[in-house]
Amino acid sequence: MTGSPIWHPFTQHGLGEPIPEVARAEGSLLHLALGETVIDGISSWWVTTHGHAHPRIAEAIARQAGELDQIIFAGWTHEPAERLAGGLRRIMPANLTRVFFSDSGSTSVEVALKMALGYWLNRGEDRHRIVVMDGGYHGDTIGAMSVGARGAFNRAYEPLLFDVVSIPFPRSHARQATLDALDTACREGAAAFIVEPLILGAGGMLVYDAQTLAEMRRICAAHGTLFIADEVMTGWGRTGTLLACEQAGIEPDILCLSKGLTGGAIPLAVTMASEPVYEAHFSPDRGRMFFHSSSYTANPIACAAANANLAIWREEPVMDRIAALAERQARHLARVAGHPLARNPRALGTIAAFDVGDAEGYLSDLAPRMLAMFRERGVLLRPLGNTIYVMPPYCTTGEQLGSIYDAIEDVLETLA
Ligand SMILES: *Cc1c(COP(=O)(O)O)cnc(C)c1O
């Protein structure tokens, strides 16, 4: 063995690609150990909202770490968690009365699926089928993979993944097929439908309209199928509103949040549930409790970071920053879209994407080649297959955004 003992996620070490070391980060900038500065064009994989090392979040973490670092959460509570749950109740959809903590987007999805199944079991109804959307992504644990797209990522685990009912992605001229498929699955007694509202992230930044989202919610409600909104990526302003669901005027039965919950500083997730979902587990009978916990559930330091995030949302002009970023980004995208290699430009809030040339799979070498080209140009962008997308922190300046798009144009020229 040579070099570092670290086995990196989603990394083929056999290719010998360089793994740069980051020493410090601030706002939208990453300062590498070797002295170079890189602009973070993907919010460090979609988590960093206000910018790296936001002083209020950093301060909250430091203060909480010296006061109460960790405490069992089964049967115990603490002020940072109570404050956070109350704060979420005030800003999240009014029907979501209950807050369950966990530590990552994947676990928030596992929790959502388990809540949905517990709901039906405790009501004495045999409903256990989950409906999903083609191309969806909900995380990398076994349950989350089961409800996500199947492919090279999970071929080895396929025999363990549970069966789901898939409905097609609502392409702009085929929305009715999606709605009909959902209606059929719900009529047949599906337990729950899990979906990424308005945009499939890892599936290639594919956008669909709010009206279809609203219609899907209506269909689920008509048949009692629980509607699970996975807003792990779309939450916290990414799509231009606090939640993507807002744009469709809908309230889910269960909501998953993680990435931007602490502003991206430290892992934390919540699964919020409606009163009927909670009620189904509420009983003097221990056998009906919700059987889920992890060691670090509602870690006080993570909750303190999330409380600082909520304070930033209340007290800083976050929505104005998002609107300004979205507006600038739309202009850059319009320019880049004129390039002969650029296809299907699309934008939603702070996210902009387009495809390069004709479709290629995730495992083609175009994505890593482009990633390396962006690295050489001092920009962190990580294309999904042949899809280039930009999803920067909200503090990204006009100049920094300009540099990201200059790099994109330069890379397109090199590939042309
Ligand atoms: C990233 C993501 C997840 C998984 O979150 P992790 O924190 O990486 O486990 C789940 N759902 C969506 C929509 C995501 O984008």
Image: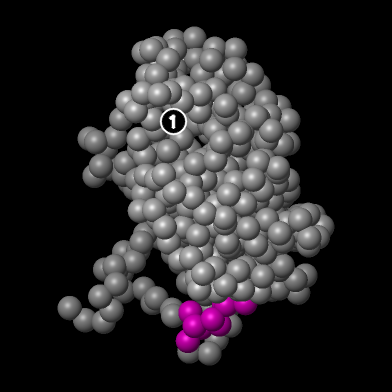
Instruction: Determine whether the residue tagged by mark 1 lies in a helix, strand or loop.
Output: helix
Q: Residue furthest left?
A: 1
Magenta stretch holds residue 311: no
Q: Position of residue 374 (x, y in %)?
A: 55, 71
- Judging depth in this view, the residue of 249 and 94 nearest the camera is 94
Q: Quadrant of residue 117?
A: top left
Residue assigned mark 1: 115
Residue ID at (56%, 36%): 98
Count of number-bearing discs: 1
**Crowd tier of the residue under label 1, counting other residues whose Cα lies within 10 Å: few below 14, some 14–19, many 20 or above:** many
Instruction: Give the residue type that dot 1 points to.
Output: Met
Q: Residue at x 39, y 76 (%)?
A: 19
| 59, above or below 118, in the image | below
Where are the magenta residues, as a range? 22-33
Q: Is residue 222 visible?
A: yes
Quadrant position of the N terminus in the picture: bottom left
**Residue 416 x/y as whole percent:** 58, 63
The percent coordinates of residue 140 (x first, y second) are 37, 47
